[in-house]
Image (spheres, rainbow, N blue to C red):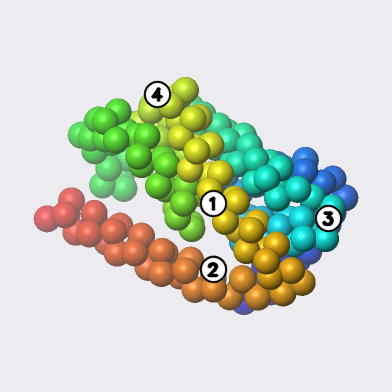
């Protein structure tokens, strides 16, 4: 099932980057960071592979990926402010989310927002969605931008570098990242389960 979905998506990513170049990296990583789970483990390793052929520069590939993350994250951030926040204030009680929870999130992002954004950008799955709660909690926007870029750059560089080293075998990375995604999803589900249990109790 997973392969049936990811295969055409992967072909589209490869086609976009092959046709548009660095701008294609910015575009696809922007989509990935706008709460749309486009796999960066295809985008960046493939771009790194192209760097191994001499078509791209590894540093520019990494910067393009990080810039794309910033662009997509800004969209998700403002979606959190305009849509997500209003939705939670109106309907949050039906999902066991209270105004107190929202205030707690605001205090958290006010105090630890920089570290939260930075380290979340280094984690599979979570990195795709972290900008939405940051917007809902109204994290300081300039700091949000800075730490989104700083957290995204090493992630993009690491994936691109591995893709460059592996060359034509870059596709084999997907298996390892898929397994990591499963672990993260399980942890998130457990966290949601604990949240529901605590609120019901």
Q: Secondary structure at mark 2?
A: helix
Q: Is residue 119 left or right of residue 42?
A: left
Which residue, given by chain and number where applicable, does mark 3 sit on? 54
Residue drawn at the location 72% of the way across and 74% of the way down = 169
**Earlier residue among tags 4 and 3:** 3
Mark 4 touches mark 2? (CB < 8 Å)? no
Which residue, given by chain and number where applicable, does mark 2 sit on? 177
User: Residue 192 location, x and y as percent?
Assistant: 30, 57
Q: Nearer the viewer, mark 4 or mark 3?
A: 3
**Earlier residue among tags 3 and 2:** 3
Which residue, given by chain and number where applicable, does mark 1 sit on? 155
Q: Quadrant of residue 12?
A: bottom right
Mark 3 touches mark 1? (CB < 8 Å)? no
The residues bearing labels 4 and 2 have C-alpha atoms spaced at a distance of: 31 Å
Within 10 angstroms of label 1, few (less than 14), some, or many (20 or more) residues?
Answer: many
Residue drawn at the location 42% of the way across and 42% of the way down = 118
Residue drawn at the location 55% of the way across and 32% of the way down = 74
Which residue, given by chain and number where applicable, does mark 4 sit on? 140
Mark 4 touches mark 3? (CB < 8 Å)? no
């Amino acid at each position: 099932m997973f392969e049936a979905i990811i295969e055409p998506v992967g072909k589209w990513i490869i086609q976009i980057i092959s046709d548009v170049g660095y701008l294609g990296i910015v575009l696809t990583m922007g989509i990935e960071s706008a709460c749309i789970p486009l796999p960066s483990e295809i985008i960046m390793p493939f771009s790194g592979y192209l760097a191994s052929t001499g078509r791209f520069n590894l540093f520019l590939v990494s910067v393009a990926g990080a810039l794309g993350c910033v662009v997509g994250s800004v969209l998700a951030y403002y979606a959190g402010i305009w849509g997500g926040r209003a939705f939670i204030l109106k309907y949050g009680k039906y999902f066991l989310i209270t105004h107190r929870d929202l205030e707690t999130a605001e205090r958290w992002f006010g105090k630890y927002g920089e570290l939260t954004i930075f380290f979340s950008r280094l984690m599979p799955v979570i990195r795709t969605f972290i900008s939405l709660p940051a917007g809902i909690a109204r994290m300081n926007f300039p700091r949000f931008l800075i730490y989104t870029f700083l957290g995204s750059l090493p992630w993009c560089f690491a994936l691109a570098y591995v893709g460059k080293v592996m060359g034509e075998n870059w596709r084999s990375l997907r298996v390892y990242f898929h397994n990591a995604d499963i672990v993260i999803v399980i942890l998130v589900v457990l966290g949601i389960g604990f949240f529901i249990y605590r609120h019901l109790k």
